[in-house]
Every structure is written in C-alpha cells, then in structure tokens.
Image: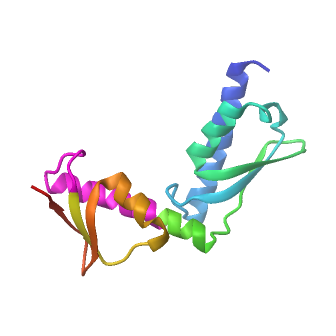
Amino acid sequence: DGLLDQMKLVREICSLGHAQRKEKDIPVRQPLSNVTITKADQLKNQEELLQLIKEELNIEDIIFQSGDILTVTLNINITPELKARGDARKIIRDIQEARKQANCNRDEFIDVTLPDWPTEHEQQIKDKTLIRNLQKGESLLVVKIS
C-alpha cells in the first residue's frame, strides 16, 4: 500500500473514532486507554501514522485484530487516572482562556485560584500555564504577576 492509501485509512479510522466519541458523549480532551482496529494490518509498523491516530483520538495504545471489514472500537472505560488526566487538560485549557481574558501574555507568570484540581497533575498544570502560586478558592481566578 502506498502512503496515500495509508493516510486515507488513517483518516477513516479517526473519523470512525470521533463518531464513537460523539455518540458516547466523550470529549476528545478525555484520554482513553486504547482502540481496537480490525482490517488495518498495513499500519502495524508505521509508527508515525500510528502516532497520528493516537494524537487525533487522544488514546494511549492501538490494538490490531484480524477481520474482514474495517472496525474501530474505542475502550470507553475511563479509569480514575484517565479521568484525572482529562480533568487536568480541561483545567489547563480553562486557565489559558482566563489568562487571555486577563490580558496576560503566554510567557508571563500568573497566580491562579481554582476550586479543585487533580493533585497528581499539579506540576503539569503549573508548568504548562506558568503558574507561580496555585491556591484553592471559590472559582477560577487568574492574576498577572507584575
């Protein structure tokens, strides 16, 4: 198979995966552990293409099975760890949006107040959003450090 055929297959897999997420009401920012794909053996050793699928569908692993037709089955079991990672991603996005509203540049350090966050991902949240101080409070508040 040529690269064009493989890319077409990747797009089809991603489209089927996104349709499943939509049907199950699972946002793409929520990581999932794996997807099982049948009739896509030609992608098995194509690391760059597999990485594309993983990033596009926000999944950690791809399992291949033999079959006659292309099927894409997301593992929708969201473990506490996957939920915490999804929550951290949402918080990062919310902080970046609040940063914009507060007229902070992306390279400026900020102090942030949040009602809650997954503590095991606190460092990642701080690093990605340049937080100097993170504290608990009623609602999301971003303060620019002058």
Is 72 on the left or on the right of 66, as rendered? left
Image coordinates of residue 99 in percent, x first then y, are: 22, 55
Residue sticking out furthest to the bottom? 138
Q: Is 51 colored magenta in this rendering? A: no
Q: Quadrant of the C terminus?
A: bottom left
Is 29 on the left or on the right of 91, as rendered? right
Q: Quadrant of the N terminus?
A: top right
Is 72 on the left or on the right of 79, as rendered? right
Determine the residue positioned at 90% across, 45% down: 67
Determine the residue positioned at 70% across, 33% down: 47
Residue 107, image quadrant: top left
Residue 40, image quadrant: top right
The secondary structure that dominates the magenta segment is helix
Color style of the picture:
rainbow
Q: Is 101 colored magenta in this rendering? A: yes
Residue 43, image quadrant: top right
Determine the residue positioned at 26% across, 55% down: 97
Is 6 on the left or on the right of 127, as rendered? right
Image coordinates of residue 122 in percent, x first then y, are: 41, 66
- Is residue 27 positioned above or below 52 on the image? below
Determine the residue positioned at 71% across, 51% down: 61
Which stretch is magenta?
Answer: 87-109
Image coordinates of residue 93 in percent, x first then y, are: 35, 56
Residue sticking out furthest to the top? 2
Q: Depth check: give the residue in front, 33 or 74.
A: 33
Image coordinates of residue 84 in percent, x first then y, are: 51, 69
Total marks shown come to 0
